[in-house]
Amino acid sequence: MAHKLAVFNMKGGVGKSTTAYNLAAGLVKFHRQRVLIVDIDPQGNSAASLGIQIWQLETQLKDVLQRQASMQNAIVSTPSGVDVVPSNILLAEEEIPISGLPGRELLLRKAIAAVDDQYDYILIDCPPNVGVFAVNALMAAEKVIIPVDMSYLGLLGIQGIERALSLVRDYLDHPIEVAGALATRYDGRNNLSKEVLASLKEHFGDRMFATQIPETVKLREAPSHGQSIFEYEPSGTGAKAYQSLVNEVIAL
Ligand SMILES: Nc1ncnc2c1ncn2[C@@H]1O[C@H](COP(=O)(O)OP(=O)(O)OP(=O)(O)O)[C@@H](O)[C@H]1O
Ligand SMILES: [Mg+2]
């Protein structure tokens, strides 16, 4: 059975997709793991960052959730060795019909069950909200990785994240665990980064990854080349940080 991890934060732009695709690529590159990314965000960012042409998809995640295609048929392989079930904006257009299906919170969990034994890790890239797609991601995952950017509003969002996880545990009876909070877009020259990191450590304690992801130009540029940071700038600080996260995830 695959380890199933959702990359979750309702706040936008915190590095969920950047983390999902670089972590996936690193698990393949450094540990020869079989890795699938499920992109359950209509922005399609983790799929696009791995070079998938998200506007030319024959089959995508929405077809699987609507039971019009098998998960197997929606899988796309990428040059980095990561497999992806991609999405694009058509997923957003199907949100209301999908929300009306019986067992709507469990659609992704059931879809993933069909390919579970083919992978060591299944990473789910969440949208920046707590709608039906994010809930499907949390219900399909055993653990969440919570990227938090180094800002006051990033810190403020933590209460909402904890509440969303409590709702899933209490009302949907799913014992989702926190694999770890991850400090992202960290800039050591900046006092706010240091203050936010200290508050994060206080809140999450040992549920915090030791790795911090720095803010770097190369991490921002890599998606436009359809490459992970390990291909785009293998010796830079971004690659080193994501390799260190990969090692922490392997050790979970
Ligand atoms: N560590 C970083 N250094 C520099 N740029 C970064 C870093 N992390 C993310 N970015 C850039 O910031 C933007 C937002 O990152 P990303 O898409 O990973 O966030 P997200 O949480 O997935 O956003 P959304 O909530 O919209 O899905 C992107 O342009 C990305 O390239
Ligand atoms: Mg994203």
Image (tube, rainbow, N blue to C red):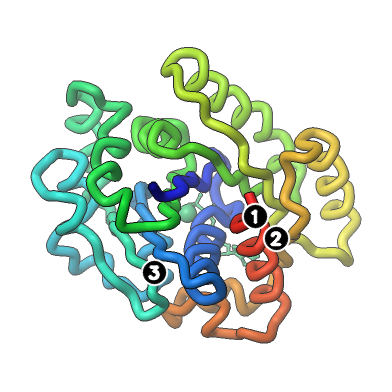
The first of marks 3 and 1 along the sequence is 3
**For the residues bearing labels 2 and 3, Cβ distance under 8 angstroms:** no
Q: Quadrant of residue 163?
A: top right
- Residue at horizontal 41 percent and vertical 52 percent from the top: 122
**For the residues bearing labels 3 and 1, Cβ distance under 8 angstroms:** no
Give the residue number, with chain letter if any, for mark 2.
185
Nearer to us: label 2 or label 3? 3
Nearer to us: label 2 or label 1? 1
* x and y, in percent, of residue 61 in the image: 24, 50
Give the residue number, with chain letter if any, for mark 1.
251
Give the residue number, with chain letter if any, for mark 3.
82
Amino acid type assigned to the residue bearing label 1 in the image: Ala
The first of marks 2 and 3 along the sequence is 3
Helix, strand or loop status at disc 2: strand
Helix, strand or loop status at disc 3: loop
Q: Compared to 148, does 189 lie above or below?
A: below
Amino acid type assigned to the residue bearing label 3 in the image: Val
Q: In whole angstroms, how far apart are the C-alphas of marks 3 and 1?
A: 20 Å
The first of marks 2 and 1 along the sequence is 2
Q: Compared to 130, does 27 lie above or below?
A: below
The answer to whether the residue bearing label 2 lies less than 8 angstroms from the nearest atom of ligand 1 is yes
Q: Quadrant of residue 82?
A: bottom left
Q: In whole angstroms, how far apart are the C-alphas of marks 2 and 3?
A: 24 Å
Find the residue positioned furthest to the top.
171
* x and y, in percent, of residue 168 in the image: 48, 22
> How many neighbours does mark 3 have within 10 angstroms: few (below 14), some (14-19), or many (20 or more)?
many
* x and y, in percent, of residue 121 in the image: 44, 55
**For the residues bearing labels 2 and 1, Cβ distance under 8 angstroms:** no
Residue 52 shown left or right of residue 57 in the figure: right
Q: Quadrant of residue 136?
A: top left
